[in-house]
Amino acid sequence: EAQVTQNPRYLITVTGKKLTVTCSQNMNHEYMSWYRQDPGLGLRQIYYSMNVEVTDKGDVPEGYKVSRKEKRNFPLILESPSPNQTSLYFCASSFWGDNEKLFFGSGTQLSVL
Amino acid sequence: AQKVTQAQTEISVVEKEDVTLDCVYETRDTTYYLFWYKQPPSGELVFLIRRNSFDEQNEISGRYSWNFQKSTSSFNFTITASQVVDSAVYFCALSNYGGSQGNLIFGKGTKLSVKP
């Protein structure tokens, strides 16, 4: 089954404790992206990747890191989480260049205390 | 700059009513794509439709229909004979073709509540 898998689904952590949210897709997509969703703000792009070893900042990259060492995986890293990073996070993937619809993961609800 | 505006924050209707969700976009690109996504209470994002800027034909899919008007930069979504299962947050989104950022710009969403 074609899917984007995010883990964990829910995460509660404390300020400053490094964490990683994993994202994996099995559709051989070149393009992957991370979004955060906040009430009243919709979804905003954090980082995106056009292919292996190619990543770039989205609209709200501060406080986040990503890596794309393999085509299928695109982890989101919070080196020192802060409460303002409490949010619902979505990973997405698609084929690049033809604006196919994005496939979204199920989301990760992160709470930073 | 690209922007998507969904002016209706929340809409509440009674089952079987028709409802239209508004979406207005801004872009300087001549080639772009517009999308609608549904987010039910379970939280996942469900793709509904993609429309490119060269195709202004309206589209109907069952109880759903979309009206794309380039003259007013709008891409409105109508649900006919709404049902309780239509209750969700609906997002309109814009993407420029082959853009270097590959970004999907989302509106802030419209929360639709359909009451029995």
Image: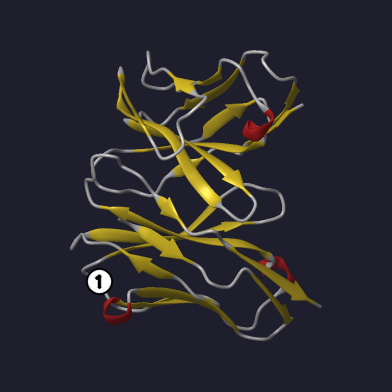
Q: Is residue A16 left or right of residue A66?
A: right
| SS at badge 1 | loop
The residue located at (27%, 53%) in the rendering is B96
**Depth order, front residue of B101/B45:** B101
Query: In x, y percent, where is residue A16?
Result: 67, 15
Residue that numbered label 1 is attached to: B55
Against B21, residue A41 (above or below) is above
Residue A41 is situated, as x and y percent measured from the top left of the image, at: 56, 53
Please name the amino acid that badge 1 sits on.
Asp
Compared to A94, does B87 lie above or below?
below
Q: Is residue A104 above or below residue B46?
A: above
Q: Is residue B16 above or below residue A109?
A: below
In this picture the colour scheme is secondary structure
The percent coordinates of residue A3 (x first, y second) are: 51, 35
The residue furthest bottom is B17
Please name the residue shown 72% across and 54% down the image. B41
Q: Residues within 10 Å of mark 1 (few under 14, many from 20)?
A: few
Task: Give the residue drawn at x 42%, y 45%.
Answer: A102
Q: How many marks?
A: 1
- The image quadrant of residue B110 is bottom right
* Residue drawn 48% across the image and 29% down it: A62
